[in-house]
Image: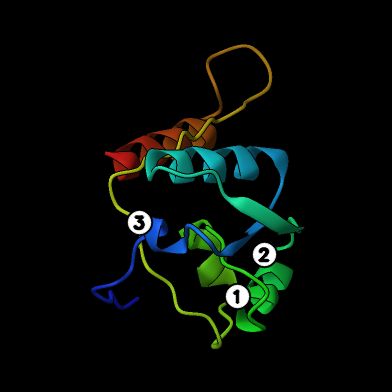
Amino acid sequence: MSRRPEDSIANHLHSAWIGGCERCQNELITLCRHAGFTPRIASLSDDMVVVQALVAAGVGVTTLPGLSLRAHRNPGVHTTELTGFTRRLHAATYGDPPDPPATSALIQAIQDAAR
């Protein structure tokens, strides 16, 4: 990911935006409002490959989780890491505690990585 001096959500005040699932759209709206505007969501897809294809085709701009770019990266899109924003991760387990050792180890690894 390269950072251009002009990279900013605020620079896309008048851009068409591509929204995803309800949670992702809420996050997008929150990020844009933090930058002082409400995004004009012109397209919707919760398929990260489709969203990147829409961006590459010039249909709009969007926000994506970094992990989705590791799974599939369309060479026709420019990405910029947004700093200063946090995401909440939740681990759901089943059954009564204590969790199996592998589950506990995974949850601990996620907590360590988040710090």
Q: Viewed as shown, does residue 24 lie left or right of 2?
A: right
Residue at the disc numbered 2 = 48
Q: Residues at badges 2 and 1 in contact (C-beta under 8 Å)?
A: yes
The nearer-to-camera label among 3 and 2 is 3
Q: Quadrant of residue 100?
A: top right
Q: Viewed as shown, does residue 11 lie left or right of 43?
A: left
Query: Which residue is at 61% across, 45% downward?
Result: 24
Q: Element under label 1?
A: loop
In this rendering, the answer to whether 78 lies above or below 41 is below
Residue at the disc numbered 1 = 72
Q: Quadrant of residue 93?
A: top right
Residue at the disc numbered 3 = 82
In this rendering, the answer to whether 82 lies above or below 96 is below
Q: Amino acid at mark 1?
A: His
Looking at marks 2 and 1 on the same chain, the residue that comes earlier in the sequence is marked by 2
Looking at marks 3 and 1 on the same chain, the residue that comes earlier in the sequence is marked by 1
Q: Viewed as shown, does residue 6 lie left or right of 47?
A: left
For marks 3 and 2, give the CA distance: 18 Å
Q: Position of residue 23 (x, y in %)?
A: 64, 38
Q: Amino acid at mark 2?
A: Met
In what quadrant of the picture does the N terminus appear? bottom left
Q: Position of residue 104 (x, y in %)?
A: 47, 30
Badge 1, how many Cα within 10 Å: few under 14, some, many 20+? Answer: few
Q: Element under label 2?
A: helix
Q: Extreme bottom residue here?
A: 75
Nearest the eye: 71 or 18: 18
Badge 3, how many Cα within 10 Å: few under 14, some, many 20+? Answer: few
| Count of numbered tags | 3
Query: Which residue is at 47% across, 44% downward?
Result: 37
Q: Position of residue 81 (x, y in %)?
A: 35, 62
